Amino acid sequence: MICTYDGDSMPVKSRSKPPKLQALRAEGTLNPSPDEVHDPKFQDNEFFDPHDIVQVKYEMLRRVSVENASVSATTGDYGVSRPTFYQTKASFDKGGVAGLVPQKRGPRGPHKL
């Protein structure tokens, strides 16, 4: 919820979502479980947003490859399974950062003969 102020300088809670969350949802990159991200940089730094799934995935991969953290410890801090980590790494290796954007679910082409 967002707090705004009325004419008497009293906080009024608004039910509208912050613009960034609305944009992430519209683009399909809103993290469905931001509360599962426990990496300290996502807690202490406003630049790192646990709601942005592309940023979360990228930082997870970077932590393993650059900081030489273990996959098990990293997946625990980012709230994902090890198979998800390896799928994310394969997507990144194949498509770069664009490979981290979630794909639409469902059939990819005609499914009737």
Image: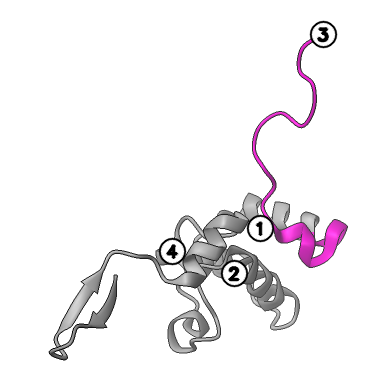
Q: Real-space Cα distance between discs 1 and 2?
A: 11 Å
Residue type at mark 1?
Phe
Q: Tell me the magenta residue range.
A: 92-113
Give the mark nearest the N terminus, 2 or 3. 2
Element marked by disc 2: helix
- Residue 108 sits inside the magenta stretch: yes
Q: Is residue 78 above or below residue 45?
A: above
Q: Real-space Cα distance between discs 1 and 4?
A: 14 Å
Residue 60 on image: x %, y %: 63, 70
- Tell me the quarter of the image containing the C terminus: top right
Q: Real-space Cα distance between discs 2 and 3?
A: 40 Å
**Foreground mark, 1 or 2?**
2
Q: Real-space Cα distance between discs 4 and 2?
A: 11 Å
Residue type at mark 4?
Glu
Residue that mark 1 sits on: 85
Q: Real-space Cα distance between discs 3 and 4?
A: 42 Å
Q: Residue at x 34, y 65 (%)?
A: 16
Residue that mark 2 sits on: 56
Residue that mark 4 sits on: 36
For label 3, count other residues whose C-alpha is less than 10 Å away and answer few (under 14), some (14-19) or many (20+): few
* Camera-side residue of 6 and 69: 6
Element marked by disc 3: loop
